[in-house]
Image (tube, grey):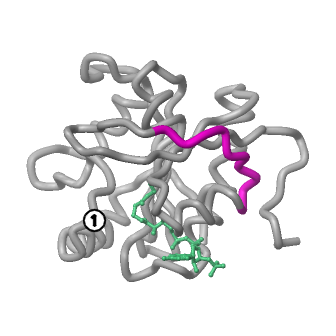
Amino acid sequence: MQLVKPDRKYYQSYVEAVEEYRMHKVQVFPFLDTESMDIFETMRNFEAGIQLPAGWVPATYFWMVDGEEFLGEICIRHALTEALLEFGGHIGYGVRCSKWNQGIGTEMLKKALPYARDVLQLEKVLLTCNDGNYGSVHVIERNGGILWDKIEHVVEGEERLTRRYWIALGKERGVRGSK
Ligand SMILES: CC(C)(COP(=O)(O)OP(=O)(O)OC[C@H]1O[C@@H](n2cnc3c(N)ncnc32)[C@H](O)[C@@H]1OP(=O)(O)O)[C@@H](O)C(=O)NCCC(=O)NCCS
């Protein structure tokens, strides 16, 4: 399993994962629309800060893959906005539905944090998740997330209870419970 920059050689597998999200009605990422956009160009533009939607910040995307199989994706935003501070944070991720509960989300976040620390030079990152998203709570807490608070708010017309976590990006990092 490795964390890589998105590449066309994983595209067929990515499309299959998108279909899994659709079947399970899981809303994960804006880049699920594989038919109407060149997702690779879009991701490159996001990283370079080109043609960003109004109010969006640059973001870097990585994919977790095994051989040529797409397992999950993770997006690291380069900065926070008022909106991201409330919902979204620095990092968002998703694991394809057929691969949940195999430790992939935890490993993916672990592998992505050095980029935030070493390339983006962030001292800490904010992660948010729905209060009832136990899988995501595990992923964040296993990577050293410290609960900041829980906020009640309305996001895209939906009432939510959102957990906000900070992960400090010290020199020595490891996943809790692993060597
Ligand atoms: C959240 C998500 C990324 C987790 O990925 P994952 O690969 O399944 O995560 P992991 O396997 O590393 O860890 C999940 C842990 O949560 C636990 N878990 C999952 N569902 C649970 C539930 N309903 N109650 C209690 N624990 C649960 C699992 O048992 C696992 O713990 P374990 O390793 O001790 O067994 C994945 O479910 C996903 O893509 N969800 C949709 C998108 C999403 O919610 N993204 C996060 C937005 S904040």
Q: Is 143 covered by the magenta stretch?
A: yes
What is the quadrant of the N terminus in the image? bottom right
Up-down relation of residue 105 to residue 92 (above or below): below
> Disc 1 marks which amino acid?
Val
Q: In this view, does 34 lie to the left or right of 160?
A: left
Which contiguous range is marked in magenta? 142-151
Q: Is mark 1 on a helix, strand or loop?
A: loop
Residue 41 location, x and y as percent? 28, 38
- Judged by its main secondary structure, the magenta piece is strand
The residue lying furthest to the left in this view is 36
Q: Which residue is drawn at 24% across and 45% down?
A: 158
Q: How crowded is mark 1: few (under 14 residues within 10 Å), some or many (20 or more)?
A: few
Up-down relation of residue 134 to residue 57 (above or below): below
Q: In this view, does 138 lie to the left or right of 132?
A: right
Q: Quadrant of residue 110?
A: bottom right
Residue 2 location, x and y as percent? 60, 65
Q: Residue at x 82, y 58 (%)?
A: 174
Residue 101 location, x and y as percent? 53, 80
Q: Which of 155 and 1 is in front in this view?
A: 155
Q: In this view, does 120 lie to the left or right of 14?
A: right
Residue 53 location, x and y as percent? 25, 23
- Residue wearing tag 1: 26
Ligand 1 within 8 Å of the CB at mark 1: yes
Up-down relation of residue 90 to residue 22 (above or below): above
What is the quadrant of the C terminus in the image? bottom right
Q: Which residue is drawn at 71% across and 42% down?
A: 167
Q: Nearer the viewer, residue 72 or 158?
A: 158
